[in-house]
Structure formats: C-alpha cells, structure tokens
Image (cartoon, rainbow, N blue to C red):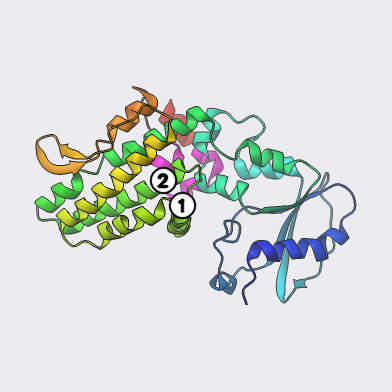
Amino acid sequence: MHVPGIELSRRFYAEAVAPAVDGPHTAALVGPGSEVLGFDTARSTDHDWTARVFLFLPEVRDVPIPGTFRNHPTKLEVATLDEWVRGFLGFDPRHPGRHDWLATPTQVFAEFTGGAVHHDDLGFEALRRRVAWYPGDVWRYVLACQWQRIGQEDAFVGRCGEAGDELGSAVVAARLVRDIMRLCLLMARRYPPYSKWLGSAFARLPAAAALAPHLTGALAATDWRERERHLVAACENVAGQHNALGLTDPVDPRASCFFDRPFRVIHAERFVRSLVGDTPVIGAIDQFVDSTDVLGHRTLTRVVVDCAHG
C-alpha cells in the first residue's frame, strides 16, 4: 500500500531524525517532488523515492541516520535556514519586493509553501507565510496578464477553423485551455504548478466541476464551431468568477463577436483594464517564458524580468 510522501517524511522525522538531533532545529518536507504538492502515487516510488527530510540547524553538522527507513532509502538534507531559503527562492522572503514576486516561477512558490513542516524552532513557518500569496497589487497584475494571454489568441480558434486549419484551431484551443486553468488557479489564490500537475491542481478547485466538461469538450472537438462553443462557455464562467472576487467593478460576463467577424470571444481586454487600467502588462516570469531551463535558473529569471520590465 502506498504511503504518501508527506506521511512517510513525518514518520521518518519522528522516529529516526528527531531522536538524533539535540537543540533547536526545523524539520520539513519542501522543495521539488510530487509528494510536496500532494500528487504522489504508487507510480512515484519507481525512481528517486526516499524517506526524506530537510533539517535546518543553526550550524551545519553531521546527523547520524539509518540508511533505510521502512524499506525505503533515506535522505536527510542539512542546511542553515537562511542560506537554504535564499538559495531556493533567490531572495529574502522577509522583505520581498515586486521584482522578487515577478521573477519567481509559481512552481517555486508552490514548492516552498507546500509540503509539511514537522518541527519549527527557527521560524520557517513565518517565512512561508510571507510568500503564501501575492500582495494585492501584484495579484491584480498577474490576473490581468493572464486575461491578456487569453485575449491575444481566443479569436484564432475560429479564424484558423474558417481557413480550413482545424489542427491549428485545436492547437490554439489547447493553449487557451491551459491559460484558463492557470487563471482559475490564480483567482483561487493557488500557485499554478508546472504542466505535469496543472490538471491535478485544477481538479481540486470548486470551479472545476462546472468548467471541466467545457474544457474537455474544447479539446475533444473536431469542428471549430464546437470548439468555440465550449471555450465561450468556459470563459463566461471564468468571467463570473472574476466578478465574484470583488476586485473590480462588475464586468459584463457575456461573450460577443470579435469586431464584425463571426467569432465569439470574451473580450478579455475589458478584464485587463478593470484590474490595472492602462498599465502595460507583460507578466510574471512564467506568463511570458516557457522554457524549463530558464525557469529553473534563479539568476536568469531575474535578469529576464529586469529586461522585460525595464
């Protein structure tokens, strides 16, 4: 029977690590790994699976632990809290600035604030709370940028289809489905994970029950009109969610034609303006960069955001 990684880590700490540690410390399961986000299954154990704990001490020292725990190899990562946090996030979470929020991928925030803290003498939970979610102005900005992405492509589903390019229409629709899912997570104050777990995270949202049939329908459709019908229904639902947040004055949630063309769109620019007015919108790093190699490089993401935002 599969034991979730968070529970395995908790037991490993309680039974093997805690008895070996003297003095103040913090122990947690955070960082990379499906178990940190709660998405691990029995399949997750087929490679790189360990009973693991991050142990933060005032000074790094050796801590003796067994090589196996409940038939799993063990992994104990020992570090000082400040050094690890700054290395993992790329900034000090005690005083995050706007640049720090925009230059940090949502996957990184999810890994830092997810998982579990087993014991905390050194104040790790306080640091996690500081970046549990975007400050209000940054939240409005990233929501606006996500709406902008939708508005830049939604009319192309119909235009590609009208031109006889059903494959191109389907590709655009798939991109829009991904952006809608990410927008819903951002509205729900959840950091969107990377692609492997995006659908799993979305499925946990209350809004997913009503939206999933339309998003699935858009992906399954073989005709652009059917594809557009599902996407319009999904966008109108998300528009209603926007209004329910109360961040702006209500915006008409109904779709209409794209200028005088027979393609129905939500006119996402209305939601962008309602959130940030005429402020230019480019986005947080993973709203305009899609390279895994770039997003995994803390220094490079900051340089890219510096260039993009001037």
Give the spatial CA distance, label 2 vs label 1.
Answer: 8 Å
Q: Disc 1 residue type?
A: Leu
Secondary structure of residue under mark 1: loop
Which region shows up in magenta?
283-301
Secondary structure of residue under mark 2: helix
For the residue carrying disc 2, how many other residues have a C-alpha within 10 Å: few (<14), some (14-19), or many (20+)? many
- Percent x, y of residue 285: 45, 39
Vertical side of 5 occupied by 111: above or below: above
Which image quadrant is residue 165 in?
bottom left
Does residue 177 appear in this view? yes
Kindly identify which numbered label has been placed on residue 184: 2
Does residue 86 appear in this view? no
Q: Which secondary structure dominates the residues rendered in magenta?
A: helix
Answer with left or right where residue 111 lies relative to residue 22: left
Q: Inspect the magenta stretch and tell me whether residue 238 lies in it.
A: no
Vertical side of 1 occupied by 267: above or below: above
Q: Disc 2 residue type?
A: Cys
Pointer 1 residue = 205
Q: Are marks 2 and 1 in contact (CB under 8 Å)?
A: yes
Q: Nearer the viewer, mark 2 or mark 1?
A: 1
Which image quadrant is residue 167 in?
bottom left
Answer with left or right where residue 67 lies relative to residue 221: right
- Percent x, y of residue 137: 48, 27
Kindly identify which numbered label has been placed on residue 45: none
At 56% across and 38% down in the image, what residue appears?
133
At 53% across and 35% down in the image, what residue appears?
134
Q: Earlier in the sequence, mark 2 or mark 1?
A: 2
